[in-house]
Image (cartoon, coloured by chain):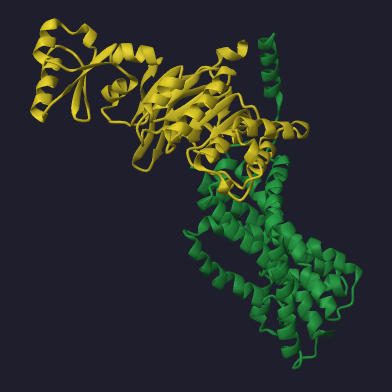
């Protein structure tokens, strides 16, 4: 009797088709992230609100007294919308870099996960979408703070979390990729100084790209953060469909490229 | 029963090289369904590499691997869904509680939602961690963490369990507890493949023992059969200064009896076949039953714990 049942269940198990990408693995990784997030949400929320406040106070009032209006907007509103991209970048890229590195090298979390029916591309996707979701939520913080500084609410602002998600996805994957490339956790200093800092300074957050020399304007087209900044401003102040589609395309291309690199390098590190 | 004819694990001529080092060198091994196989070998024999290959976390350079009928690595996701892995390295999530650790793995192993809670509770009972279910893993003692690590690999009722050095570094009492847990698994009909370098662990738990050395299996059989083939029933240990030990070895060799060094002594094996004349020449010694360690040392020439 029991032997019959055993054979039956064995043969039904054989029929189970596990697909190349199983959405359930996202759920599994997210359960874990949510449990951890319940512990650290307060500190993350604090810094994500206080940081743009300080930027707006320092740059908005300090710098804003020199330049009252940029591209037809009060400087503080120009800056507040631009800071969305900064918040998205920092939330997603740093999570991707440090969390992934610590889990792979010190905690051996991925070695444990890969012994279950989850593959590298699934765990990379699951973690990146989690970081991107956090980036989408915390990317809104500068907007909320800007509203306290006088930015008028608009319906287009509802698009900002989606822009934050798409941008955050690309940068989280960028972080995951670099975490698999760097030999040690200190090496992130090179990435932060040589890549992250220029990206966030020359994205049109603090000053418009249009005032820069032509070569810098061309270079900005290759800065994903620039596309995020432009999209957020258009969402808040008024969409320009064709141009915004171009920005969305650029961000999607960035995310896709980074996904490919992140998966490839993580596989190289985790499977031998 | 059709299922039982096919071995749970099947390795054929498996080779894995890391640069100039050949970690696994033509390994061929079957683990029959429902049995417990102890993979015994010194550090560096290739046990962990073999274990990693079964979950496709290491890809073999050549050879064939089947786990529960699935070809590895091509179909490894299916195999991984049906097997539980207890790694040598403690990688429980220290930031999560015991219950959260198990719950995450119940998700990863796709335990259906209605059964998930029950599976986690059962695993907590198995690991005797019901009282500590909501304690963060970093606050658990070493033994508790190891039990959690084992329970994590069992949360989905696997048909095959891989245990990589399950009790390494644990004190004897905790080791005993884990042995009871593994023994319970075996009695439930779960196939167990356990790598170890503790002879006693293999002797107590394994139906079959495979001795691994330099990336290959050098002997495979029941502990009894291995003793019969390589060490006989009884051994006598002779103590003395180095030249005395050398003398004992040469007398035994002349009589065709295997010997091995045991710390400051020489053990002569298979003494039940020893002629009285040889016994007289060897003089007094300490008689004891032969054990797997004797087999191991004779075969691999390496010392073990």
Between B27 and B102, the one lying in front of the other is B102
Residue B199 at x, y percent in the picture: 37, 26
Q: Chain letter for yellow, please.
A: B
Which quadrant of the structure image shows residue B206?
top left
Residue drawn at 64 percent across, 31 percent down: B125
Identify the colour of chain A in the image.
green
Which quadrant of the structure image shows residue A199?
bottom right
Residue B123 at x, y percent in the picture: 64, 32
Residue B93 at x, y percent in the picture: 59, 46
Q: Is residue B18 above or below residue B184?
A: below
Residue drawn at 68 percent across, 46 percent down: A29
Q: Residue furthest right?
A: A155
Q: Is residue B237 above or below residue A233?
A: above
Q: Is residue A256 above or below residue B270?
A: below
Is A212 on the left or on the right of B40, as rendered? right
Residue B235 at x, y percent in the picture: 24, 16
Between B251 and B134, the one lying in front of the other is B134
């Amino acid at each position: 009797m029991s032997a019959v049942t055993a054979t039956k269940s064995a043969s039904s198990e054989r029929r189970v088709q596990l697909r190349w990408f199983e959405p359930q693995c996202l759920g599994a990784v997210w359960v874990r992230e949510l449990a951890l997030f319940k512990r650290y949400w307060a500190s993350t929320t604090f810094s994500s609100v206080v940081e743009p406040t300080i930027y707006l106070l320092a740059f908005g009032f300090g710098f804003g007294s020199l330049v009252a209006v940029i591209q037809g907007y009060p400087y503080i509103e120009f800056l507040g919308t631009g800071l969305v991209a900064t918040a998205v970048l920092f939330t997603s890229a740093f999570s991707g870099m440090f969390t992934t590195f610590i889990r792979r090298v010190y905690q051996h979390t991925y070695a444990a996960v890969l012994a279950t029916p989850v593959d590298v591309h699934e765990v990379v996707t699951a973690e990146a979408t989690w970081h991107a979701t956090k980036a989408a939520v915390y990317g809104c913080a500068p907007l909320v703070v800007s509203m306290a500084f006088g930015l008028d609410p608009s319906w287009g602002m509802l698009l900002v979390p989606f822009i934050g998600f798409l941008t955050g996805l690309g940068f989280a994957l960028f972080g995951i990729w670099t975490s698999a490339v760097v030999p040690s956790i200190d090496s992130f200093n090179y990435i932060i100084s040589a890549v992250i800092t220029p990206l966030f300074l020359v994205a049109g957050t603090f000053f418009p790209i249009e005032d820069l020399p032509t070569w810098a304007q061309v270079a900005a087209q290759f800065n994903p953060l620039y596309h995020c900044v432009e999209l957020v401003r258009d969402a808040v102040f008024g969409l320009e469909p064709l141009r915004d589609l171009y920005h969305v395309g650029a961000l999607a291309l960035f995310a896709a490229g980074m996904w490919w690199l992140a998966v490839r390098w993580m596989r190289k590190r985790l499977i031998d | 029963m059709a299922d039982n004819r096919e071995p749970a694990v099947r390795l054929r001529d498996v080779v894995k090289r890391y640069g100039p080092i050949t970690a696994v060198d033509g390994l061929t091994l079957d683990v029959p369904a429902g049995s417990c196989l102890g993979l015994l070998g010194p550090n560096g024999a290739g046990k962990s590499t073999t274990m990693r290959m079964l979950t496709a976390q290491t890809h073999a350079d050549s050879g064939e691997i089947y786990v529960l009928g699935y070809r590895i690595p091509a179909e490894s996701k299916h195999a991984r869904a049906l097997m539980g892995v207890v790694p040598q390295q403690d990688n429980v999530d220290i930031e999560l509680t015991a219950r959260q650790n198990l719950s995450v793995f119940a998700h990863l192993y796709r335990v259906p939602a209605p059964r998930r809670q029950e599976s986690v509770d059962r695993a907590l009972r198995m690991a005797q961690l019901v009282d500590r279910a909501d304690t963060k893993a970093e606050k658990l003692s070493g033994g508790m963490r190891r039990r959690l690590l084992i329970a994590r690999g069992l949360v989905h009722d696997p048909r095959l369990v891989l245990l990589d050095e399950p009790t390494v570094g644990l004190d004897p009492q905790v080791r005993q507890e884990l042995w009871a847990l593994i023994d319970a698994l075996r009695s439930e009909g779960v196939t167990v493949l356990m790598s170890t370098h503790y002879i006693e662990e293999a002797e107590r738990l394994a139906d079959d023992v495979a001795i691994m050395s330099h990336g290959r299996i050098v002997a495979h059989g029941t502990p009894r059969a291995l003793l019969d083939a390589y060490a006989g029933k009884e051994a006598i240990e002779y103590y003395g200064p180095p030249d005395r030990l050398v003398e004992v070895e040469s007398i035994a060799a002349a009589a065709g009896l295997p010997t091995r060094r045991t710390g400051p002594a020489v053990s002569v094996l298979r003494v039940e076949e020893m002629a009285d004349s040889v016994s007289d020449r060897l003089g007094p010694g300490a008689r004891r039953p032969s054990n797997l360690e004797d087999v191991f040392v004779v075969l691999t020439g390496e010392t073990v714990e």
